Amino acid sequence: MADTPRQDPSPAAPAPARRPVPVRWVLLGVLLALLLSMLDGLIVGTAMPTVVDDLGGLDRMSWVVTGYTLATACSTAVWGKLGDLFDRKRVFLASVVLFLVTSVACGLAPSMNALIAFRVVQGLGAGGMGAGAFALIGALVPPRERGRYQGMVAAVMAVGQLGGPLVGGFVTGHFGWRWAFYVNVPVGLVCLAWCGLLLRLPARERQGAVRIDWAGIVLLSGAISAFVMAATWAGSTYAWGSWQILGLGTLAVALLAGFVVTERRVADPLMPPRVYTAHRNFPLAAVLLTVTGMTLFGATLYLPLYQQVVQGATASHSGLLLLPMMIATLVATSVAGKVMSATGRYKLFPVVGAASMVVGMGLLSTAGTDTPHSLTTVSMIFLGIGSGFAMQMSNTIAQNSVSMRDMGAASAATNLFRTLGGSLGLAIFASLFTSSVQGGPAKGPVYAAHVAHATHLIFLVGACVGVTALLAALAIEEVPLRGKEPTKPVTEGGKGATETA
């Protein structure tokens, strides 16, 4: 019997494709880092009286917060550019590691000077976490689909802005001030593990050699430092017209001018001018973010003070007093996101948001010593609508105005504008408040009248400045939102490869 030819075995069936992780789950890990970077400044502010009791250094207390804010602002643009130049995921995770290591160091600080030094380095990590989180959101979710996840981002930002004092008071009161830093560690480790395992980004095309814009880094960091220090000290440590403040302001302008000239000449600028000139929507969104950051900072800082001193609310419930604004922010963001995803239309929301912000601040400016709680509640609802419609939508508009290669720089810029707006608001509002209450009694009905007058001025200025945001929103051009973009192969040195950002 002839041998029957042996048949080749049938090829093995291909392995089933790996099921992609839903974007919503991936975003949870990214947003944990954003939450940490926002919460930490507010948590530490609540713990500072206890820190001073333990370490001393009352005269340097403000630098625990100022050093952190300054380092965050200065490093934001650098982290964003590093994400554009290198692996965005690894740069982001490196900033989280830096933040966690210095959180432990802050908790172990033996002196006020050591705490300030560790806080500065911790602020560097926070700058990377904030800039990286927004850049990753821009890379993971195209603008047209951003509305589906807008509620998640808004919830994290609302908790970060309003939950800090509550968490700080609880942790400090029950476990001590050092745990205000240690509490970052378990949350940060979850973030690291989550993003390390689940975060996968579209491939990006990398062209040419990497060039670091050292001159731009130095000039921008110097300009931001001078600005933040002037904004922090003006009206409190030094008078607005003092040579110290005028000198810092002049230095900030000179360094910024040098930075602009440098960015137009270098091959790979830190903040490419094309980001600001590609479409008019980006600078308009920057104005929106700066103004809303400034006005909303004044509301969240001085409204609880008004409610405690003038309306008789208890300090233990001061954080809860802002719940109407937080709820309104979440609802407004959710509505705007769903409508934007379904229709692709979005201009109406920043316009309505800016107008609501002006109305809310205007109503608060009429508050006096006999104003009922109902008026402040209604005002907070208007402010929450303004935050949900204007601030959240501005990020999407800005990111939709740039190409994917500049997503990190654009996201860092929007984060920077929000930070600088808050710093400027702090300087102006603190100066108005100090000038209104200084020389008067420290308690009693007369003090309440001084506080009411001070907050009247703060909210009136906020309403007037808010008109600028409304004008910027009206000037925005409604261009189509980008949808999903295909991944591209990366070629380096003639060799085909793929890269995850």
Image (spheres, helix red, strand yellow):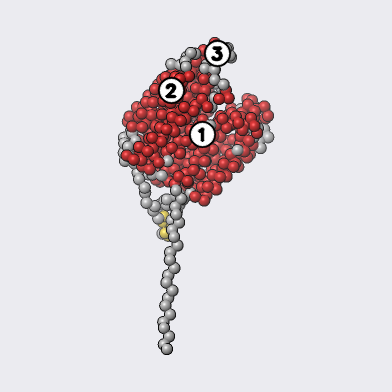
Q: At 68% across and 35% down in the image, what residue appears?
A: 110
Mark 1 and mark 3: span between their CA atoms?
Answer: 31 Å
Cα separation between marks 1 and 2: 22 Å
Counting from the top left corner in percent of width and height, residue 291 is at 42, 28
Q: Are marks 1 and 3 in contact (CB under 8 Å)?
A: no
Residue type at numbered disc 3: Tyr
Q: Nearer the viewer, residue 235 or 174?
A: 174
The answer to which of marks 3 and 2 sits earlier in the sequence is 2
- Quadrant for residue 350, please give it: top left
Within-10-Å neighbours for mark 1: few <14, some 14–19, many 20+: many
> What amino acid is found at the position of numbered circle 2 in the picture?
Val
Name the residue furthest top. 446
- In front: label 1 or label 2: 2
Can I make out residue 71 in this image?
no
Mark nearer the N terminus (1 vs 3) = 1
- What is the spatial separation of the Cα atoms under label 3 and label 2, in whole angstroms? 25 Å
- Which residue bears the numbered disc 3? 447
Q: Report crowding for label 2: few under 14, some 14 to 19, many 20 or more residues within 10 A (C-alpha).
A: some
Residue depicted at 48% across the width and 41% down the height: 133
The mark total stands at: 3
SS class of the residue under badge 3?
helix
**Residue hosting label 2:** 378
Q: Which residue is mark 1?
A: 160
* Residue 353 in picture, x, y percent from top left: 38, 29
Q: Secondary structure at mark 2?
A: helix
Measuring from the top left, give residue 249's x and y in whole percent: 48, 26
Task: Tell which of 453 and 247 is nearer to you.
Answer: 453
Q: Position of residue 374 (x, y in %)?
A: 45, 20
Q: Earlier in the sequence, mark 1 or mark 2?
A: 1
For marks 3 and 2, give the one nearer the viewer. Answer: 2
Would you identify the image quadrant in which residue 6 lies?
bottom left
